[in-house]
Image (cartoon, grey):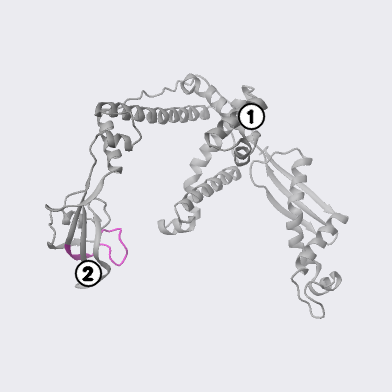
Amino acid sequence: MKNVHDVEVEIKGSEWSNILDAAFNKKNKDLRVDGFRKGKCPKNVYIQKFGIESLYMDAVDEACNDAYTKAIKDNDLLPVCEPKMDVTEIDKDHVKFKFTIITRPEVKLGKYKDLGVKKDPVKVSAKEIDEEIARLASRFAEIVVKDNGNVLEGNTAVIDFEGFVDGKPLEGGNGSNYPLEIGSHTFIPGFEEGIVGMAVGETKELNLKFPENYTKDLANKEVKFNVTVREIKERVLPELNKDFYADLGYDNIETEEEFKKEVKAAITERKNEENKNKYLDDVLEAAAKNMEVELNPEIIDDEVHRMLNQFGEQLRMQGISLDQYLQFTGTSHEDMHKQMEPEATKRVKYRYLIEEVANKEKIEISDEDANKEAEKMAQEYDVDKAEFLSHFGGLEVVKYDMKMRKALEILGGEEVK
């Protein structure tokens, strides 16, 4: 492929000698050799004892970054993913690196304007408004003890239970004062359904069967549960009144009619944003079909690794690691890599498409405009401009972001402005 470049870089003479000296000093720092104090072994004694070859690995690590910088600078290359590096020759006098560097592939745009993509009209039904109000009200629902009546769907039944398989107690199949939300599907099928209708103090025997996809030793086995209801709790939704509206941040609303108008406006705004994103995705898909680009597997791999890192960061914010997630879901790194490849391919194609549109349309962003945008974004994040630019990646990243957005506006036409 035209965007794959094999570049050799040689480091020799005093430069290589200095790197070997640095590698020796690093090793010697904690080295103990008979007859010498820790870290005081002379280099010639070290080489006689361990061989100069023992320095090569650390020396290569030390030299690699500078060699790579030289490779891309001398050949005026702009890599788009991590290079492949091989050491082709190495001895006491020199080292030769071979870098396989992948640059941006050639992109040939097809038709990218007036693609006939239509944006769906936004409609908000009365049912959607009622469902949104119910969702908002549920956030402020109180959980109260139900003095009379029976267990209903949506109630929380506080239960004692004990399970038996083949007449023997089920390991881990018992509990006391366990709060079970009916409808949460926490237990095996039939368990929660069997509790519906029970009253406080009532004991019931549930004869059920473990599902096929359960653990190997229990799949399809019959199980008996003895269940006693100790307490029933229910969610009491707040009244739709001025206090409730104020709790949601609507201080100026007094009537249900006004509240519904606000809810409808919020749903409409959300749907408009979703609609815009879907429209842009449809436009990009249509334009990408008209584009010609050959993507190296390494570019896709690099994007997958970026996505995996982002996913891992999201998991860490939830308190679990990627390895734990893989263990819980029975998935391997290879499985996840394969699952992410189609999305990674799409992302890379769309990125190159937008960049090429920006190039063809000769979109340029001035320092003045980029600084104004940085100031505006810093205010939105409530930080000063210098701090924002430090986290965002600098003014050039702001320019790139603005350029991509302008290219998207050209692709999407008036629908995204």
Quote the CA–CA distance across marks 1 and 2.
70 Å
2 inside magenta stretch: no
Q: Where residue 7 sits in the image (x, y, percent)?
A: 75, 45
Q: Horizontally, is 403 left or right of 156 in the view?
A: right
Residue visible at 17% across and 60% down?
Answer: 229
Circles 1 and 2: CB atoms closer than 8 Å: no
Reply above or below: 222 against 271. below
Q: Quadrant of residue 397?
A: top right
**Magenta-colored span:** 211-228
Q: Amino acid at mark 2?
A: Val
| Mark 1 vs 2, N-terminal side | 2
* 302 to the left or right of 14: left
53 vs 270, nearest the viewer: 270
Residue at 80% from the left image edge and 70% from the top image edge? 51
Q: Secondary structure at mark 2?
A: strand
Q: Quadrant of the N terminus?
A: top right
The kind of residue tagged 1 is Asn
Q: Which mark is residue 371?
A: 1
Number of numbered discs overlaid on the protein picture:
2
Left or right: 183 with respect to 95? Answer: left
Tell me the residue that label 2 is attached to. 165
* Residue 300 drawn at (x, y percent): 56, 43
Q: Is residue 108 in sight in this rendering? A: no
Q: In x, y percent, where is residue 319?
A: 45, 55
